Every structure is written in C-alpha cells, then in structure tokens.
Image: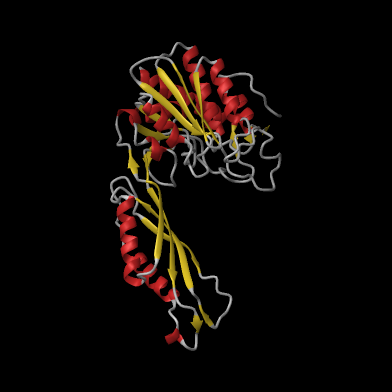
Amino acid sequence: MTCSVTDLTDPLDLACGLIACPSITPDDGGAQNLLARTLESLGFRVQPMRFGAIHNLFASIGEGERHFCFAGHTDVVPPGPGWRFGPFNPVVEDGVLYGRGAVDMKGAIAAFVAAVAAYRTRGGAGRISLLITGDEEGEAIDGTKRVLEEINRAGERIDFCLVGEPTSIAQLGDVIKIGRRGSLSAAIDIPGVQGHVAYPHLADNPVHRLLAALQEMLARPLDSGSDWFQPSSLQVTSIDVGNPAGNVIPGHAGARLNIRFNDHHRGADLQDWLAETLRRHAPGGRCQVRISGESFLTAPGPETTMMQSAIAAITGVSPRLDTGGGTSDARFIANYCKVAEFGLCGTTMHKTDEAVAVAQLRDLARIYEAILVGYFQ
C-alpha cells in the first residue's frame, strides 16, 4: 500500500509523507515544508531557518522552566540503483515500510511528532521543541550548528536533547548513545624531485618520506581507551602518487587519514602531533586537517536512567549505554546541553531497500512519549 499524511498520532502516515520527499543533501525536496505544516497544525511555533542552500527549522510548543528538545534531520544519502519499489515511493508490504530515510531518520522524526501529539492529547505539559536540519548527511556546516548558534543568540536555552539517530542494533531499545568519539581527517602532501629510478641521487623520492612519516604515526598507540570509550584509532584511507611509470621517481606523494579519538584527546593536540611528525620526515610537506567534531560524553544521570526505564517499559529490553559508532549532530548539541541519542535499528540505513517494521516505528513513538512523561513528571 502507499501512504498519505492523515493521523498525526500514528507515525506511519507522516513517515510516508516525508519519505516521498526526495531530500538528498542539500536538496530539501519539500520535506521541511511538509514537517512545518504538520507541526503548525499541532500548535507549534515554527521558525524556518535557511542558511545557503540548506533548509532547517526550529519549532516549539508549550511553556515551562524545563525545555526538552528532539533533534534530527530530513536529508538522506543518495539511494543508488536496485530498489524494489523506488526509494521515494513509500510502500508498506507485510508490515514493513520501505523507502529512503525510513530508518535514517525520517521514521524517527515522524515518531517525534506522533509522540508529542499523543502526549499533549493526554494533557501533557512542558516546553518541547524540534530542531530539524537538512544538512546532517552532508558537510553539516549550515545545519544544526548554525541553528544552535542562532537560537542561543536569541536567548533560547535547551536543558536536554534527544537525537533520533538509529542507535538500536539487534532489537529496538538495546542501545542508547551517551557520547561519540571525535573525528579528525588529514590530507598530507609531500613534494619531491622527479627523476629516473636509475639515478636516485639526482632525485628526491617523496614516497619514502611519506611512508616513514606514516609508519611513525601508525606505530604510536594513541591510548588504551577510557571509562566510556574504546581506544582511539588512526586509519590511513589512501596513499596517492599518480605515477603511471615504473621507472620514474614521482614528484610528489600524498595520503589521507582519519583519527577517531576518545576523551583522552583534543583535536588540536592531534593536529599538532601530525604536523610535528611530518616535519621530522618531510620538512616541506603539508598537512591539511579538518576536525569535524570533538569527543563528548553525557555522563549517566537522572535523564539516562529515565530513558532506560521508559524503553524497558515499552520493549522489555534493558538498554546499555554506549559511545561507539561514527559522528552525529549530537557533537554540536553537546556544547549547549545534555544530549543522548536513541532510535530505530540501523541494520538497513544507507542501504538499498532501507526499511523499518511498522510495529517498531509505532513502538518508537510510544517510547518517545514515555520519555516525555518521565522527563516532565
């Protein structure tokens, strides 16, 4: 069957409507407009926030000293070929909803809305907001980070934020993310002097310098992990020379690497270490670094305990607290308030025929509603 938006307390309808919007970063495909209209119909005050080509919104409802925020993204990754029903043609078959974004993370956004609708229908009070970006799967420059800067300048203060990323692994409710490792990407370029391999004294082989620098970087154990984080990891992702000839010493050599680092490190310190190592082996080398996020941790406390209880009450599963996986927009939110992540099972995210069981989607909405009850009680 195909879907249309009708019942706001059931996440299926809105999930289908959002999936039907081809919102491949940076295109919005109408997703933010659909969400804004839906939230306005519930009484939300909606602030569209566009930065460059990116559509974002911040919407709030209710009053009170404590402010609970749901955060997520309407943009999706390119679908690729081979879909059974078409990536932007939401279809439910045998109790499973198919479509790009069903899991990551239009399904969770629909569950946000259904949870708030049900919560307020039952008389629930409190200040609730949604911070939704269209730039999570892209460079994340004009998305959540910019929205947070704007609302902070306007005096908006969030006390706790729940990001609806697909954190569950084997079954809904088994994992809550309370932190993430930082991420540093580096591009190294080392100039040399091109020459014939038979006359190495007339050349300067940059490949040898590059390999020596990389070997030293890889030989250093960054750390052995910490209380909540696994050991930091440096991974070389490419070595590039661009030399088609086997008898020519190349004129330059380059490499790319990524470091996923825990709370033992700051990005700037790792950047300095890479630069110093490169200087020892290749004084003329260049190392361009991009730190896309620092590590962060929301220490276990009343909010995470409440979330665990709410999840267990709906699913019967006792979730563990975890910090593994990649980065998310929670890295920006952590600079402003406590933040945790919880959402659907991620086994099909970014894959062909991305899908979620409708029963799981509805359970997620019930969990989010229970979290609101627990937070404001």
Q: Position of residue 11 (x, y in %)?
A: 57, 25
Of residues 302 and 22, the one nearer the viewer is 22
In-front residue for pair 241/35: 241
Give coordinates of residue 311: x percent, y percent: 43, 29
Tell me if residue 166 comes above or below residue 312 in the rendering. below
Quarter assignment of residue 210: bottom left
The furthest residue to the bottom: 198
Q: Quadrant of the N terminus?
A: top right
Q: Coloured how?
A: secondary structure
Q: Quadrant of the C terminus?
A: top left
Task: Depth check: give the residue in front, 137 or 376.
Answer: 137
Quarter-wise, where is residue 123 in the image? top left
Q: Is residue 104 visible?
A: yes
Of residues 357 and 142, the one nearer the viewer is: 142
- When the figure is inspected, residue 160 is found, relative to residue 99, above or below; the finding is above
Instruction: Write the residue at 33% across / 49% down.
Output: 262
Q: Residue furthest top?
A: 123
**Residue drawn where x is 34% and y is 68% of the image:** 216
Q: Is residue 171 left or right of residue 19?
A: left
Please provide percent x and percent y for residue 376: 36, 18
Q: Is residue 360 visible?
A: no
Is residue 258 found left or right of 17 in the rendered image? left
Q: Position of residue 306 (x, y in %)?
A: 35, 27
Answer above or below: position of 197 versus 66: below
Count of all numbered marks drawn on residues in the image:
0
Q: Quadrant of residue 319?
A: top left
Residue at 47% over, 17% down = 119
